[in-house]
Amino acid sequence: MNRGMDIAMPAIKTVMARIRQNQFAPAIFWQGKEYSYARFLDMVEAWTERLSAYSIGQGVVCGVLGDYSPQTCALFFALMEAKAVLVPFSYAAVPEMPAFLPLAGVERLFRFDAEDHWTLETFEHGSPNDLVVSFRKRESPGLIVFTSGSTGKPKGILHDCERVMRKFVEERPGWRTVLFLMMDHFGGFNTLLSTFAYGGVGVCVAGRVPEIVCRTIQQSRATLLPTTPTFLNLLLASRSYTQFDLSSVALITYGTEVMPDVTLQRVKTIFPNAQVKQTYGLSELGVLRSKSESDDSVWVKIGGQGFEVKVVDDILWIRSEANMVGYLNAPNPFDQDGWMCTGDQVEVRGEYMRILGRESEVINVGGQKVFPIEVETVLLQDKNISEATVFGAKHPVMGQVVHARVSLQRPEDPQALTERLRGLCLRGLARYKMPVRFLIVSDEIQSGERFKKVHRRLNDNRC
C-alpha cells in the first residue's frame, strides 16, 4: 500500500485494507490452533451481516463480555467498521456491570463463553449519556473503557476509535503477541489493534496464571509478551519458566505500574535473549511510544509522534492527539491548552525519566515522602519474598507510617521474617521509610485479577 493511500484513507479503512492483503498469513492462535487472516476476515464479514440483522450500526452502544478469541476479535473489527460504540467487559468486570451498563447506555450485549459461543441481550436504559449522544454526530466508531476505581469511583472513558487507530497506520513489523492485558483495559485494546494492524498473530490465553501463559508461549512460539511487573514477579516466584521452552520470546513490554529494579534484573536473567522494554500510557491519553535507556534500566524516554510531554514540579504532564473524547461521569481533566496532569511523580535525567509512582500513593511520614517502589525494591531482595506491596497507614503523630504486604515463597515464622526484613530495610533505607508492620498474604491478594498492585489498605490482608 502506498503512503499516499495511507494519508488519504481513514485509519480504520487503511488498516482493514492492509489486513485483506495478509489473507494467507496466520492471524490468531487459540486453543492450540492457528487461524489465517482469510478465515478471520470471513468471521468479520459474518459479524457484519449479523450486526445488520440486529440493527447494530452507527452510534449503537454495544457491549462485549468475554476474553480474546477468534469471534470476539472479529466482532471488534466488525463493530468498528459499522461505526458502533464498543464497550468491552472482561469476566473480572461482571460484578460492576450493573453500574457500568446504564452509565455507558449499552443497548446490546454479546456474552461469550470459554468455547467462543455467544448470546445476545437487549437493554433499554433511561436517558442516554449526554457525551455519547454528542459523539454520535461524528459518525465515528467509539470505545468506552472504565478505570479501575482504585483511587475513587470508576470513571467511564469515551474514545474515538478512528483517532486511536491513527497511531497504527504507519506500517511496522508484526509480532506473535500474547494478548495478556484484558480487552476492557485500554492497554489491552491497544495491543489488539497493533497486533492486527501490523499483520501479527494474536495469541489468546485460556488463563493468566504463569503455567498457562508459559505453556501457551511454548505452543504458539509467541515472540512478544506485554504484561505487568506484578505478573512478572508471579512468574518468577512460580518458576513455571523452568518447565517450558520460552526461547521464542524476543520482546517483553511492561507497564501499568512501576517496575522494581530487582524484578527487572531477574527477568533479564531468565529471558537473556529478549529485549525488555518499559511502556507508558493512560486510559485517557492512549499508549505513548517509549524507549528504555537499556534492557536492565527503569529509565525511559516517552513521547513520539502525536504526543508531547513536560514535567512541572516533578509531575508528568502529557498532551496527546489521541486524547479521549471525555469522561462519561466526571469533569474534563484537560487544561485549556489540552494538557493533562498524569499524577505520576518522575525524576528526570536528560531525555530520560524514571517514574516513581502516583502522587496519590506517596506516603507522608512526618512530612517526609516515601515512594512505595523504593521500599518494595529492597524487600524483594529477600529470597523468600515473592511479592511486596507497600502502602501508607494512618498514624496519630506521624500522619502516616509505612506498612507492607508480603507474599512468601515458603512458610516461615512471622517473627523471624519480620526481624530479617527490618534488618534488610535498615541497611538499605532511611529509618522513616521502614515498614512498621509486615502483613503476610497470598500471591492472589497481591496480584488481583488484573495483575496490578493496590497501594492501600485492604480489608482481607491480616496475617
Image (cartoon, rainbow, N blue to C red):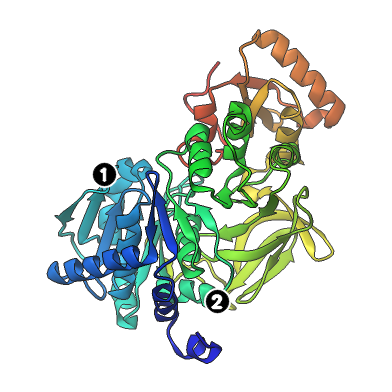
Quadrant for residue 245, please give it: top right
On the rendered structure, is 382 left or right of 219?
right
Residue 392 appears in view: no
Q: Which of 319 and 81 is in front in this view?
A: 81
The residue at the far right in this view is 427
Q: Mark 2 points at which residue?
A: 321
Residue 215 to residue 17: above or below: above
- Quarter placement of the C terminus: top right
At 53% from the left and 41% from the top, the residue drawn is 218
At 86% from the left and 26% from the top, the residue drawn is 427
* Three-letter residue code for mark 1: Asp
At 14% from the left and 66% from the top, the residue drawn is 54
Q: Position of residue 199 (x, y in %)?
A: 49, 67
Judged from the image, the secondary structure of the residue bearing numbered disc 1 is loop
Q: Dot 2 surroundings within 10 Å: few (below 14), some, or many (20 or more)?
A: some
The numbered mark, 1 or 2, whose residue comes first in the sequence reads 1
Q: Name the residue under label 1.
A: 113
Q: Where is residue 103 in the image (x, y as percent from the top left)?
A: 29, 57
